[in-house]
Structure formats: structure tokens, C-alpha cells
Image: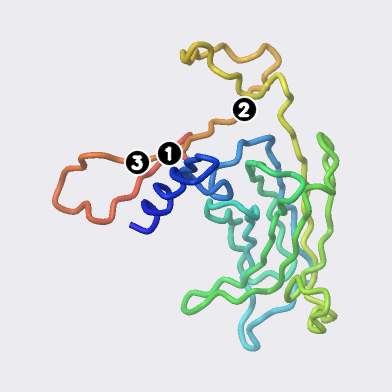
């Protein structure tokens, strides 16, 4: 009611304007501009968290400002110098401000997995189309004034490559409201390209148990 009164009231004031907010721009989906390829090579000199047992480390990776779940490496049992050599891909929407957050955890059969350390990679510091080998010191927090960061927690080694989309590869606006599926460019790499899907809504769902619906998207085995 307050919104209606305000908007109608504005119509009777000079200048006569009617502003209708449709969507918070900060919540709108940003357009993908590239892909970040990351290989988690290994970690070294990790400090065990269990006084009695041995540590079972794994790494979690996540892009900042990304609503997707974190990606995880496999768990390496009883190993403070684990080798993974596992590859991951991340969609980049804002290379000037996004970062890759890397956390190393000690896997536990029961109870909370304890964090062994963390660090971040600023995308703007990665030269495009160039593979960079990164050796990151594992920290307690990303607070530069945290005195606990002076304690050695080991390192994690990554290989990171930022591949921005070329301007001619970006999605072209449809003509006259008609979307055409075009053949991929001749130079498109066999494993390259990006499928960008936005799930908007569902309608008229059926069944007895749909009070809390969710959708699954599965592509080449990745859910």
C-alpha cells in the first residue's frame, strides 16, 4: 500500500515520473566473460590437526560472488604432503573483482572437518591465456593483521589459467526476436565452450511431495 501511494503520488507531482523497480541490479546474473582452469597439484608440509591420529587432507575451491557449491578434491588418507593433480573449471563473470578461494580441510569420519589453512587468488593478477604456477602459503584467515598467520601451516601448489572469451565469441543479440542456433566457429577447441543456464521457475507441479521443490541439471555427468 505504501508503495502504491508513493508511486501514485509521484504522478501528481512535477515532473510527472513513474519509476517501477523491476530487479535489484546487484542480484542480476552477470554475463560470463571467461573460464578459469585450475589444477590442484599438491600440498606440502601440512600440519596435522589430530594429536593422536593422522590427517586426511582435501581441498575446496570456490569463486567469490558465485552461488554454485564449492568444488572438492579427493581425500588423501594419512598424508601431510598429498598429491592430487586434479583439474577444475570455473565460470568468470568479473575478473577485476573476483577471487578464487582455496581451503584445505582435514577429513573426519565423525564430526566437523577441521580447516588446515586457506588462501585466495586474485583473478586480476593472472595474465590471460598464460598458465601460472602458484605456491600459496596456507593461512588461518585472510586478515593481514591476524598474528596467527605467522604460524607455518604448509603450502598448496596450483596451476591456474584464465581464458577470457574473445569478443567475437560472445553471444550475439538475436535479430528481430528470433534466436538461431549457429554452428560453432571452426577454431573452437574440442573441449571448449560454455553452456550458461538460468533456471527461472517451475509451474503447475504435480505430485504429493512438492512443497520444497528443487531442480537438477546434469551435463556430461556433472550435476
Q: Quadrant of residue 89?
A: top right
Relative to 26, 206 lies left or right: left
Q: Is residue 223 visible?
A: no
Q: Quadrant of residue 148?
A: bottom right
Q: Where does label 2 land, which residue?
A: 193
- Quadrant where the C terminus sits is top left
Q: Residues within 10 Å of mark 1 (few under 14, many from 20)?
A: few
Relative to 203, 100 lies left or right: right
The residue positioned 78% from the left and 53% from the top of the image is: 122
- Above or below — where is 105 with respect to 123? below
Relative to 114, 10 lies left or right: left
Q: CA distance from mark 2 to mark 3?
A: 25 Å
Q: CA distance from mark 1 to mark 2?
A: 17 Å
Nearer to us: label 3 or label 1: 3
Q: Position of residue 34 (x, y in %)?
A: 69, 35
- Above or below — where is 108 with respect to 177? below
Q: Is residue 94 visible?
A: yes
Task: Tell me the element at label 3.
Answer: loop
The residue positioned 64% from the left and 78% from the top of the image is: 54
Q: CA distance from mark 3 to mark 1?
A: 17 Å
| Residue farthest along the left direction in this orientation | 208
Nearer to us: label 2 or label 3: 3
The residue positioned 57% from the left and 11% from the top of the image is: 183
Q: Where does label 3 land, which residue?
A: 201
Task: Tell me the element at label 2.
Answer: loop
Q: 150 or 11, which is in the foreground?
A: 11
Q: Residues within 10 Å of mark 2 (few under 14, many from 20)?
A: few
Q: 200 or 25, which is in the foreground?
A: 25
- Earlier sequence position, callout 1 versus callout 2: 2
Q: Position of residue 166 (x, y in %)?
A: 74, 25
- Quadrant where the N terminus sits is bottom left
Q: Where does label 1 land, which residue?
A: 218
Amino acid at each position: 500500500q505504501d508503495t502504491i501511494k508513493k508511486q501514485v503520488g509521484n504522478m501528481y507531482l512535477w515532473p510527472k515520473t513513474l519509476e517501477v523497480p523491476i530487479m535489484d541490479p546487484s542480484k542480476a546474473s552477470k554475463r560470463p566473460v571467461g573460464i578459469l582452469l585450475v589444477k590442484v597439484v599438491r600440498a606440502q608440509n601440512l600440519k596435522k590437526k589430530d594429536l593422536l591420529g593422522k590427517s586426511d587432507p582435501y581441498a575446496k575451491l570456490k569463486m567469490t560472488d558465485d552461488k554454485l557449491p564449492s568444488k572438492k578434491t579427493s581425500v588423501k588418507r594419512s598424508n601431510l604432503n598429498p598429491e592430487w593433480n586434479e583439474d577444475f573449471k570455473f565460470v568468470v563473470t568479473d575478473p577485476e573483482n573476483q577471487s578464487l578461494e582455496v581451503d584445505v580441510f582435514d577429513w573426519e569420519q565423525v564430526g566437523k572437518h577441521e580447516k588446515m589453512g586457506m588462501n585466495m587468488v586474485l583473478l586480476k593478477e593472472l595474465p590471460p591465456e598464460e598458465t601460472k604456477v602458484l605456491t600459496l602459503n596456507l593461512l588461518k584467515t585472510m586478515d593481514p593483521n591476524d598474528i596467527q598467520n605467522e604460524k607455518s601451516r604448509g603450502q598448496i601448489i596450483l596451476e591456474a589459467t584464465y581464458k577470457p572469451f574473445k569478443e567475437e565469441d560472445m553471444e550475439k543479440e538475436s535479430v528481430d526476436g528470433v534466436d538461431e542456433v549457429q554452428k560453432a566457429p571452426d577454431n573452437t577447441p574440442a573441449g571448449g565452450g560454455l553452456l550458461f543456464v538460468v533456471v527461472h521457475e517451475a509451474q503447475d507441479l504435480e505430485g504429493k511431495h512438492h512443497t520444497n521443490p528443487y531442480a537438477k541439471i546434469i551435463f556430461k555427468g556433472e550435476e
